[in-house]
């Protein structure tokens, strides 16, 4: 995985115009699958997250936040990691941060 990271950084800093979006999406998907399968390299350890509305900052999300949530939902559904009813949970999580 370290070799892959170094090669990715090298290509993105020197020849970023030759890498297509499909190649980047495929690379990201494979990296996530690899990292999630390896307990020692997981980015996020599995935990039960419980947030309540009372601990969340008031107000609405910015358009950038909403766009990020939509992109995350779309990719999460594509990977079959998120269900169709996950939007409210992600909005709550972003507002909690």
Image (spheres, helix red, strand yellow):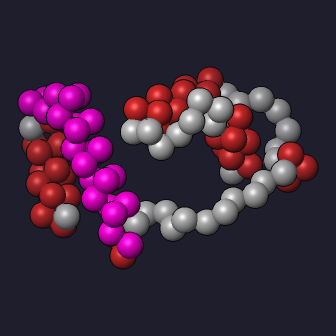
- Outermost residue, right direction? 54
The structure residue drawn at horizontal position 17% and vertical position 34%, both measured from the top left corner, is 23
- Judge from the rendering whether residue 92 lies leftward or rightward of residue 90; answer left or right: right
The percent coordinates of residue 74 (x first, y second) are 47, 28
- Judge from the rendering whether residue 28 lies leftward or rightward of residue 45; answer left or right: left
The percent coordinates of residue 18 (x first, y second) are 9, 30
The quarter of the displayed image where residue 67 is located: top right
Q: Is residue 2 above or below residue 66?
A: below
The structure residue drawn at horizontal position 17% and vertical position 43%, both measured from the top left corner, is 12
Q: Which residues are magenta?
A: 17-39
The quarter of the displayed image where residue 11 is located: top left
- Judge from the rendering whether residue 16 lies leftward or rightward of residue 81; answer left or right: left
The quarter of the displayed image where residue 75 is located: top left
The percent coordinates of residue 4 (x first, y second) are 15, 58
Q: Any magenta on residue 15?
A: no
Q: Quadrant of the N terminus?
A: bottom left
């Amino acid at each position: 995985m370290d070799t892959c990271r170094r090669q990715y950084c090298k290509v993105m800093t020197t020849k970023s115009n030759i890498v297509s979006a499909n190649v980047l999406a495929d690379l990201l998907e494979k990296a996530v699958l690899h990292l999630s399968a390896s307990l020692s390299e997981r980015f996020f350890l599995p935990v039960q997250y419980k947030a309540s509305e009372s601990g969340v900052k008031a107000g609405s999300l910015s358009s950038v936040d909403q766009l990020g949530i939509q992109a995350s939902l779309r990719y999460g559904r594509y990977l079959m990691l998120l269900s169709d009813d996950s939007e409210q949970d992600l909005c709550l999580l972003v507002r909690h941060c």
